[in-house]
Image (cartoon, grey):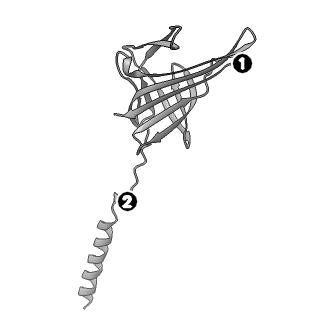
């Protein structure tokens, strides 16, 4: 009888040990990790010129760029962003004409979660506090940059990038 009790105890213990695996671990990867193709960029800049407050607001889609604009957030905190230039030219009728050129050399920097939707993005020895929002089951991203280090005291700037996970 002792032997049967001993065997039953070992059997129950072995079941407990093998059924307590690591399958309860939760995925702790931040949902912004991945590569995001930007489809729209919105600029909202306010400045004072000759004592008069001026404002510049423009939204453009990236479909006319020569290549996709991407933001790639790696798990290790590395950020890779397409280096691109945008030229706005006043066409005197409909506002602005847009020339968007994605350059060959990507910008590489860092990203860090501060809390909630607040992140710090660092590129080219400069950093900016940004807000990042995800929607559509974490497949759409909105990156709102509201603080830029090199603005004058009477200037404000907001740049919003909108994109999809690829």
Crowd class of label 2 (few under 14; some 14 to 19; many from 20; radius 10 Å): few
Q: Position of residue 48 (x, y in %)?
A: 70, 14
The answer to which quarter of the image holds residue 69 is top left
Which residue does the image show at 24% across and 91% down from the upper left? 1
Which residue does the image show at 73% across and 8% down from the upper left? 50
The vertical placement of 156 against 117, above or below, is above
Crowd class of label 1 (few under 14; some 14 to 19; many from 20; radius 10 Å): few
Q: Position of residue 41 (x, y in %)?
A: 48, 24
Which quadrant of the rendered structure holds the C terminus? top left
The vertical placement of 133 against 55, above or below, is below
The answer to which quarter of the image holds residue 129 is top right
Label 2 sits on residue = 24
Label 1 sits on residue = 154
Q: CA distance from mark 1 to mark 2?
A: 52 Å
State the SS at label 1: loop
State the SS at label 2: helix
């Amino acid at each position: 009888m002792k032997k049967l009790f001993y065997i039953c105890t070992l059997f129950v213990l072995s079941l407990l040990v093998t059924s307590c695996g690591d399958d309860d671990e939760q995925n702790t990867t931040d949902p912004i990790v991945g590569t995001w193709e930007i489809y729209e960029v919105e600029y909202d800049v306010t400045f004072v010129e000759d004592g008069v407050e001026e404002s510049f607001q423009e939204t453009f889609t990236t479909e006319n760029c020569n290549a996709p604009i991407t933001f790639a957030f790696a798990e290790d905190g590395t950020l890779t962003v397409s280096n691109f230039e945008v030229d706005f030219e006043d066409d005197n009728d409909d506002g602005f004409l847009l020339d968007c050129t994605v350059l060959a050399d990507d910008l590489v920097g860092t990203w860090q979660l501060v809390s909630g939707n607040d992140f710090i993005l660092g590129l080219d020895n400069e950093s900016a506090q940004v807000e990042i929002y995800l929607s559509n089951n974490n497949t759409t991203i909105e990156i709102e940059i509201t603080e830029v280090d090199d603005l004058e005291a009477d200037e404000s700037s907001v740049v919003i990038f909108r994109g999809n996970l690829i």
